[in-house]
Amino acid sequence: MKALTLRPHWAWFVVNGYKDVENRSWPTRLRGRIWIHASSSSVTRAEYAHFLSICKDRRIKKIPRREEIRFGGIVGSVEIVDCVTSSRSYWFSGEYGFVLKNARKTRFKSMKGRLGFFEAG
């Protein structure tokens, strides 16, 4: 199955079902379930502060501590159902948005990520 690497805090939003669009500068024709890989760098203090402000704005109540956000491996999966150039989603801000549905968390599996889509088992 293909995987896509995201910064760990964005990966958390995706696999917990909060983020319904993933922004990219390139389009995709890929549809179906993919793994979500959290990049190997931990969440910085500035990223965590931004994460908290988004949680507050989106009224997300169950918020992990910074050190609880997993990184450097597969954290879940999601289905890509479309690729759009505009959207009313709170999360859309890119040139292209991969529309996401049916997020699932999974047991963490440590592995290196790559740019773009990559094969991850």
Image (tube, rainbow, N blue to C red):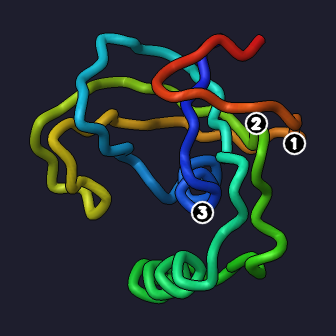
Q: Amino acid at mark 2?
A: Ile
What is the secondary structure assignment of the residue under circle 1?
A: strand
Q: Which residue is mark 3?
A: 9
Query: Residue at position x 46%, y 87% from top?
Result: 53
What is the quadrant of the C terminus in the image?
A: top right
How far is disc 3 from disc 1 in space, using C-alphas? 15 Å
| Percent x, y of residue 120 | 72, 16
| Percent x, y of residue 24 | 30, 38
Q: Nearer the viewer, residue 100 or 66?
A: 66
Q: Which mark is residue 13?
A: none
Dot 3: few (<14), some (14–19), or many (≥20) neighbours within 10 Å?
Answer: many
Residue 76 placement: quadrant: top right
Q: Which residue is mark 1?
A: 108
Q: Which residue is mark 2?
A: 74
Q: Are marks 1 and 2 in contact (CB under 8 Å)?
A: yes
Q: Is residue 96 above or below residue 61?
A: above
Query: Residue at position x 21%, y 48% from top?
Result: 94
| Percent x, y of residue 54 | 44, 79
What is the quadrant of the N terminus in the image?
A: top right
Q: Earlier in the sequence, mark 2 or mark 3?
A: 3
Q: Amino acid at mark 3?
A: His
| Percent x, y of residue 4 | 55, 30
